[in-house]
Image (cartoon, rainbow, N blue to C red):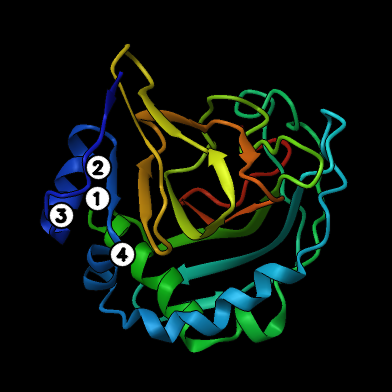
Amino acid sequence: MTSVDLVAPMTIRSADSALRQVGYALLTPSEFAQALDFDLSSLEPLRESWSDLPKDAYLRDGGNYRSRRHSCFVQEFPSGINEVPHRAHWQSTDYNALHGGIERWFEPIVPAVRGNPQWLKLLAGFGEIFATLHATQRWFIEAHQFRIDTAEGIGRPTPEGAHRDGVDFVVVLLIERRNVRGGETRVFQARGSAGVRFTMTEPWTALLLNDAEVIHETTPIQPDSTPGVRDTLVITYRADGFQQPGSE
């Protein structure tokens, strides 16, 4: 498995090409801002909401290291993006052996975030990029705010291990990383042995994944002198409706 260097510039076109050819694209904050035509300072007010995430009550490994919120949206082309009534997050055990097969009702993302114009622009911008790779009239979008902490020692960003999400595309956006060691992200071919590894350290670094082509995981984090946190926003895009029992 090789490491990835973030020094090579990634244009929108090369990101599209990378998603097609190798199944992932890793964007620096400036590349992310360029790809979605963002002033990153406009996203800063959203970061505060990661400090108010309820604990995840569904962890089956007995841990207490993950907090999260979850909300769903539908992006119609060309009309735009809208929030849908709050619903459970569900995955098949084929994609999540640890937490699959159950309806997980997480608290929704707070209104001040999910109604923020910059938030909606963020969701829609990635959706437009993915629509150039997969023709669709609409995306069914699930957004997850995650905080992994090390208050009790080790925190596990992906307790289910290397996995696919059962969707078409995934975005992992780093919001903050503070006082932690570890947290190396690994991306492997779904049908092969090749893989890459890297550690996302700078806020607003974005990892885009073609879920049919790759599996991914992030290694545990440990405290670096004091308890720390790793905050991410994970957004999934699926053309064939939201995942629910019977949708495998």
Neighbourhood count class around disc 3 (C-alpha, 10 Å): few under 14, some 14–19, many 20 upward: many
Task: Name the residue carrying label 2.
Answer: 19
Amino acid on which disc 1 is placed: Leu
Query: Hey, which quadrant is residue 106 in on the image?
Result: bottom right
Q: Earlier in the sequence, mark 2 or mark 1?
A: 2
- Give the Cα separation between the discs numbered 3 and 4: 11 Å
Tag of residue 29: 4
Q: Earlier in the sequence, mark 1 or mark 4?
A: 4
Amino acid on which disc 3 is placed: Met
Query: Hey, which quadrant is residue 64 in on the image?
Result: top right
- Give the Cα separation between the discs numbered 1 and 4: 22 Å
Return the x and y of residue 146 as percentages of the image width and height: 65, 55
Task: Name the residue carrying label 1.
Answer: 133
Give yes or no for contact between labels 2 and 1 (Cβ–Cβ under 8 Å): yes
Q: Is residue 109 above or below residue 55?
A: below
Amino acid on which disc 2 is placed: Leu
- Give the Cα separation between the discs numbered 3 and 1: 17 Å
Residue located 39% across and 58% down the image: 202
Task: Name the residue carrying label 3.
Answer: 10
